[in-house]
Amino acid sequence: MQIKRYEVANVQEAITKIKKELGPDAIILSTKKIKGSGGPILEVLAARELDLTGADQGNRSDMTLRTVEKDEGRGTADSAPAFDRNFDELKKLLEDLKNDRDLRAELAEVKDSINTFFDVLGLKRNKTGQDGTDSVYFSLISQGMSKEKAWRAVEKIRNEIASGEIESSDAGLAAVENLIQRSLPAVNEFDKGQRVKILIGPTGVGKTTTLAKLSAHSALNEKKSVGLITTDTYRIAAVEQLKVYARIIGIPLEIASGNSDFKKSLSRFAGKDVIFVDTPGTSRNDTANLRKLYETLGTEIPFESNLLISLTSSKECMLDTALRYKMFDYNHIILTRADECMRIGFLWDILDRIAKPVSYITNGQNVPNDIEEANPQKIARMIVGSDLH
């Protein structure tokens, strides 16, 4: 089996080069975004068999150009030998790589390619090459979307099209974007209208900076009277940072070390149009301080709570954060550090699990500019890769 790596601008360019250099029977093993000298580029790993006999060529063509799945995933008898042979070759390739010191670092990537290989087999339909099905699928997983989610999205949009065919990659991605947009909840205007707005989230996610951005926008742009409260008495630097922001913006700041102080601060700000509350971050498994924060924020006054999640975190950490802060019954998600990300396709999987709307996205450290309101359309475009920054 011959494996070749391509660095291209998009999936369509990769497919054109692969068909030209490796032939129509080549398969794409993996795709991922990497940093190039001129910005993000797409790295594509493709493969084809070598020294095939005429009979083998027929089996190979049968495997890649005809349907190999039938009746909800049950393989046909005539495709099984070709499938087994190619799968065995992939396993042999992995064994060879173990003994090659130069390629050992890529072993994990090639292992993952076996999973993608199965996906390729499922995607190859009678009319592959005539529509944009495979281009859409590989574009989605190159953005970080899970293979299952990408597969379901492609199947869904194909079922919604009268002809059952995706005319082009652009048309397919636009349809997926629309599908994602329809699946995401919108911000509840009633919750958004609450006078007290609390920001919660793990350490280092950007709560204090985000609080300053929202406070400055309300005070300077919307001309509202604003009050700030911080319950983060653990980090002196955080309090000092908020004092600087409050002085620049021209708004008062209260420091509350417990529930009693918090209620008094709310009472002193009774005449304010909006009150923003900063909170301390907690590390993973720090349930004691998380419970203490929950008790500190206890009040009869209704408030809007926003969970901040950094887009630079792993999928597992983001889901863990959402689960740990579930006790606060947060209303919205604020996504931070969008400017540091190249792809966030996995976000669709996460938002599906969290089932909470995204209210804001931050994309830099500048106060108050680097923040914008979010909506399902914006999030969908970011997930597909049309509008990440």
Image: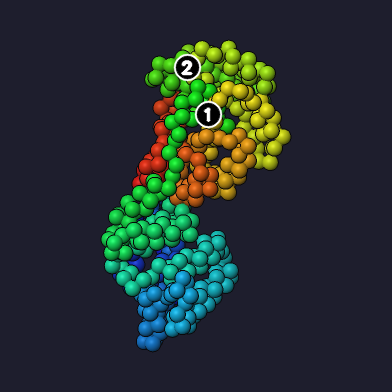
Task: Single out the residue that lies furthest toward the right.
Answer: 288
The image shows residue 32 at horizontal and vertical percentages of: 44, 56
The image shows residue 240 at horizontal and vertical percentages of: 58, 19
Going from the N terminus, do you reach mark 1 or mark 2 first?
2
Amino acid at circle 2: Asp
Amino acid at circle 1: Glu
CA neighbours of label 2 inside 10 A, class few (<14), some (14 to 19), many (20+): some
Element class at badge 1? strand
Quadrant for residue 108, please give it. Answer: bottom right
Q: CA distance from mark 1 to mark 2?
A: 14 Å
Q: Are marks 1 and 2 in contact (CB under 8 Å)?
A: no
Q: Quadrant of the C terminus?
A: top left
**Whether residue 217 is visible:** yes
The image shows residue 57 at horizontal and vertical percentages of: 37, 82
CA neighbours of label 1 inside 10 A, class few (<14), some (14 to 19), many (20+): some
Compared to residue 282, the image places residue 162 above or below, namely below
Left or right of 300 in this view: 36: left
- At x 48%, y 75%, the residue is 74
Q: Which residue is mark 2?
A: 273
The image shows residue 177 at horizontal and vertical percentages of: 36, 49
Quadrant for residue 55, please give it. Answer: bottom left
Compared to residue 283, the image places residue 260 above or below, namely above
- At x 52%, y 63%, the residue is 112
Q: Which residue is mark 1?
A: 304
